[in-house]
Amino acid sequence: MSLSAFDLAFDPVYDELRARWPESTEEHDVVTPYGRTRVHVYGPADGSPLVLLPGGSATGLVWFANAPALGERHRVHAVDLLGDAGRTERRGAPLPLKSAGDLTAWLDALLDGLGLTRTHLCGHSYGAWLAARYALHAPQRVDRLALVDPTQVFAGFRPGYLMRALPALLRPSEARARAFLAWETADTHPDETWQRLYALATTAPGRRLVAGGRPRAAGLRMPVLVLLAEHSRAHHSAEVADRARRTLPRGTVALLPRATHHSLPLTAPEQLNDVLTAFLE
């Protein structure tokens, strides 16, 4: 099969970011009813499992700055999301992706394929929304849940954020995605290779992220960490923090100074790694 123009542009940048991961990182392609899923695996084989779900367009590779620290004691599994850019199958899957229920069924199959009966689960942005939904769907499989600047879990998006995002959503292009990133990340200067990957990912043919309603966060009975970006433009962090504290039966809320929504998890990773590692242990 000949490579598309998208593949010719995207693949070298993907491989460049993949090279930033530790040398012993393994690539697993897990077969699920919804399509083959790429998972980047790092850490000791006997480490406690930790599944990382990225935000939209970020790919599982976005955790490259966190994997070395998290992989000291955990077996890290960073996932390329179903329906998004990356090495996970987007088209031609046996079962089409139609609903949030399909996403949780996909994660059931993915954990089965990875041999994970139970795991810690961490997600950023859209990945945090998915992680929260999955933890409600299968609480017996989630030991601890970490939500990094979660969107559509405790509060909606700021109208100004949606207005800025709209051009890149309606008419995806690298230039629009880069302009949006530059506005939201302000002076945090996320990794340049990742920014190129993100901008290209928004133009992926067949890309489709399934949305849904807010999960009932009060039903999350496991320990939950909510890590919020101080300067997130996606939502009002103080409002999200207040709702999380009032909603979660076993919740911990922390603020990441100077961070913005899209600068996470790769900007000032030491802060995120320290808080997340302490929570998981």
Image (spheres, rainbow, N blue to C red):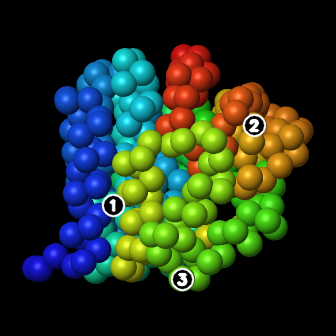
Disc 1, SS: loop
Q: Position of residue 103 (x, y in %)?
A: 50, 64
Q: Quadrant of residue 157?
A: bottom right
Task: Give SS at disc 2.
Answer: loop
Residue 186, percent from left and from top: 65, 47
Tags 3 and 1 touching, CB below 8 Å: no
Quarter occupied by residue 238: top right
Residue at the disc numbered 2 = 230
Instruction: Give the class, few, some or many, for how many residues have Cα within 10 Å of label 1's Cα (few <14, many ≥20).
Output: many
Q: Quadrant of the C terminus?
A: top right
Kindly identify the residue that appears in the image at 31 percent across and 26 percent down: 43
- Disc assigned to residue 86: 1
- Circle 2: residue type: Glu
The residue sitting at 59% across, 23% down in the picture is 271
Q: Residue 171: which numbered mark, if any?
A: 3
Of the residues tagged 3 and 1, which is closer to the observer? 3
